[in-house]
């Protein structure tokens, strides 16, 4: 008679073990469902009221994110960016994220409990319990980091982008005054090392840079300036040595020392400089930005450096410093500069002129505009924000950030024209201000003609012709021919 016993190796699991296995799979599935679609686990087991509330909140957030992403691809993107950049929006997000995360964590733990852990084996209880705890801790950590990021953004935007600028375009253009100094904004004794105006077409983003030498004399104060009465014929000192007296970059310090003449003005140095620059160029300044060049190094590092084609070696150090000139930035193609080397490239004085340094500074600005990608801003925003809060003061309102970023993206692919008011175009010790205003008007007209006829040469423009010289004394030229920004 044949035996009916089964081999030991082919025996079926006991009903208890099968039940425990089913319970473990159920716990894992319910937690997975909650991780992907919050509320779906509760809906699956019949807790419809809680499940519907959680699902509707999740679906609404997903639709909101999708709608925002789609709007970023439309002309409404400046509105979306401006809305997001509002400190109130960021503060709401700062507190909303941890609340949502807490709800998500509770749903995860509820999903684990719905699987009835009493039916699990000891091993299954440990496995599912540890997994639920890991998922909860991970969600909490991510939410904490996101909340911190929103808090940082709200702080930076609230502190830096305080507003006060003129949002009204001037003859179809936004004009931004960029001041670079070697100290924090409005510290006693600060003198802007770099004075540049970016004139931007509001339709195309095409930009013209106008650079003024720091050693310009006789700078005129506008009639409504508190300093006009003191210097009715321009900023000039009757002293023997004019090499470092009453220069354009000294107006900042002059206004700080006479801040009582600017009641209620947070940055009298910038305000006085802005008025003088408007008078020199014949342009109405919409916004200004003050950049501390010492902190500029952090910003370059935060965005991963810049790349330039460098035609001439640039010294690191000072002949009058304790170390002297101790290193060089060597010429070459596609040279990557970190923050330290980019700062020295922009500010180095030895074996060059102020005018050459102005060109190098505009090279760095151009590289930042051309090479800064949106994904870099998103992935490194915390580092950029921390650097920006330390080095930048501006009167750009947060509501206009979207508009200005939109213009920057439009102008990114267009040639950036540049004018440096240096010899032989202008004699800084005795500048012809009427000529400066004529050059500004002509250069803007030529730039706008490029937009009107992008495929051909603009006609009827009195724009100055670029010099054929390859040295750094070119006064008016497309910036790419002065200093090549690597692609």
Image (cartoon, grey):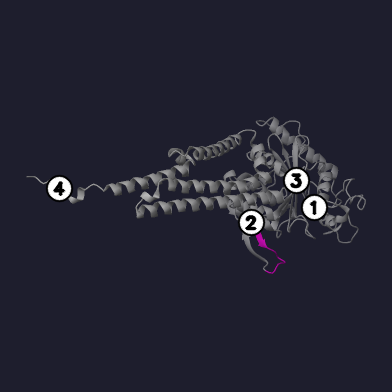
Give the dominant element type of the magenta stretch: helix, strand or loop.
loop
Q: Nearer the viewer, residue 288 or 311?
A: 288
Helix, strand or loop at label 2? It is: helix
Tell me: 280 left or right of 96: right
- Callout count: 4
Q: Could you give the CA–CA distance between mark 2 and mark 4, rounded to whole angstroms?
A: 77 Å
Q: Residues within 10 Å of mark 4 (few under 14, many from 20)?
A: few
**Residue 374: horizontal and vertical position, in percent?**
59, 44
Instruction: Mark 2 and mark 1 in contact? Answer it, CB < 8 Å.
Output: no
Question: Can residue 115 be seen from the camera position used here?
Answer: yes
Tell me: 14 left or right of 310: left
- Check the picture and name the quadrant holding the N terminus: top left
Sequence-wise first label, 1 or 3: 3
Determine which of the numbered discs, if any, sits on residue 163 in the image.
3
Task: Point out the frontmost of discs 2 and 1.
Answer: 1
**Residue 108: horizontal and vertical position, in percent?**
47, 47
Helix, strand or loop at label 3? It is: loop
Which of the 4 image quarters holds residue 172? top right
Q: Which residue is mark 2?
A: 298
Determine which of the numbered discs, if any, sits on residue 267 in the image.
1
Sequence-wise first label, 2 or 4: 4
Instruction: Mark 2 and mark 4 in contact? Answer it, CB < 8 Å.
Output: no
321 part of magenta stretch: yes
Q: Could you give the CA–CA distance between mark 1 and mark 3, rounded to whole angstroms?
A: 13 Å
Q: Could you give the CA–CA distance between mark 2 and mark 3, rounded to whole angstroms?
A: 24 Å
Helix, strand or loop at label 4? It is: loop
166 part of magenta stretch: no
Q: Which residue is mark 4?
A: 5
Sequence-wise first label, 2 or 1: 1
Which stretch is magenta? 312-322
């Amino acid at each position: 008679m044949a035996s009916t016993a089964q081999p030991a190796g082919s025996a079926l699991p006991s009903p208890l073990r099968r039940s425990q296995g089913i319970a473990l799979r159920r716990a894992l599935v319910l937690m997975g469902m909650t991780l992907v679609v919050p509320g779906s686990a509760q809906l699956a087991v019949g807790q419809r009221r809680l499940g519907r509330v959680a699902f509707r909140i999740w679906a609404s957030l997903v639709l909101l994110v999708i709608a925002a992403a789609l709007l970023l691809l439309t002309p409404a993107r400046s509105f979306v960016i401006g809305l997001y950049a509002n400190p109130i929006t960021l503060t709401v997000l700062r507190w909303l994220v941890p609340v949502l995360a807490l709800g998500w964590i509770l749903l995860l733990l509820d999903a684990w409990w719905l699987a009835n852990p009493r039916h699990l084996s000891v091993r299954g209880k440990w496995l599912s319990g540890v997994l639920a705890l890991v998922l909860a801790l991970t969600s909490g950590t991510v939410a904490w980091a996101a909340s911190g990021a929103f808090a940082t953004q709200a702080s930076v935007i609230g502190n830096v982008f305080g507003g006060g600028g003129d949002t009204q375009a001037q003859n179809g253009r936004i004009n931004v005054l960029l001041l670079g100094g070697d100290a924090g904004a409005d510290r006693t004794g600060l003198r802007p090392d770099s004075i540049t105006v970016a004139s931007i077409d509001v339709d195309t983003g095409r930009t013209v840079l106008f650079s003024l030498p720091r050693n310009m004399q006789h700078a005129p104060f506008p009639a409504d300036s508190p300093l006009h009465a003191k210097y009715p014929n321009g900023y000039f000192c009757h002293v023997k040595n004019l090499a470092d007296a009453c220069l354009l970059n000294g107006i900042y310090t002059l206004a700080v020392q006479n801040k009582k003449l600017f009641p209620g003005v947070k940055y009298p140095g910038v305000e006085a400089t802005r008025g003088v620059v408007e008078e020199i160029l014949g342009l109405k300044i919409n916004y200004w930005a003050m950049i501390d060049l010492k902190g500029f190094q952090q910003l370059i590092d935060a965005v991963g450096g810049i790349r330039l084609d460098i035609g001439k070696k640039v010294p690191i150090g000072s002949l009058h410093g304790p170390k002297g000139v101790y290193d060089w930035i060597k010429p070459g193609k596609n040279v990557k500069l970190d923050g330290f080397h980019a700062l020295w490239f922009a500010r180095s004085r030895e074996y060059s002129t102020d005018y050459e340094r102005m060109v190098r500074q505009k090279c760095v600005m151009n590289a930042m505009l051309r090479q800064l990608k949106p994904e870099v801003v998103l992935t490194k925003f915390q580092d950029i924000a921390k650097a920006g809060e330390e080095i930048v003061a501006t009167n750009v309102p947060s509501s206009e950030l979207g508009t200005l970023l939109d213009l920057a993206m439009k102008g990114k692919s267009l040639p950036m024209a540049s004018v440096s008011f240096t010899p032989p175009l202008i004699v800084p010790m005795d500048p012809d201000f009427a000529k400066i205003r004529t050059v500004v008007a002509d250069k803007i007209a030529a730039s706008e003609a490029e937009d009107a006829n992008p495929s051909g040469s603009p006609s009827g423009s009195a724009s100055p012709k670029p010099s054929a010289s390859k040295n750094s004394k070119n006064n008016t030229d497309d910036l790419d021919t002065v200093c090549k920004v690597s692609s």
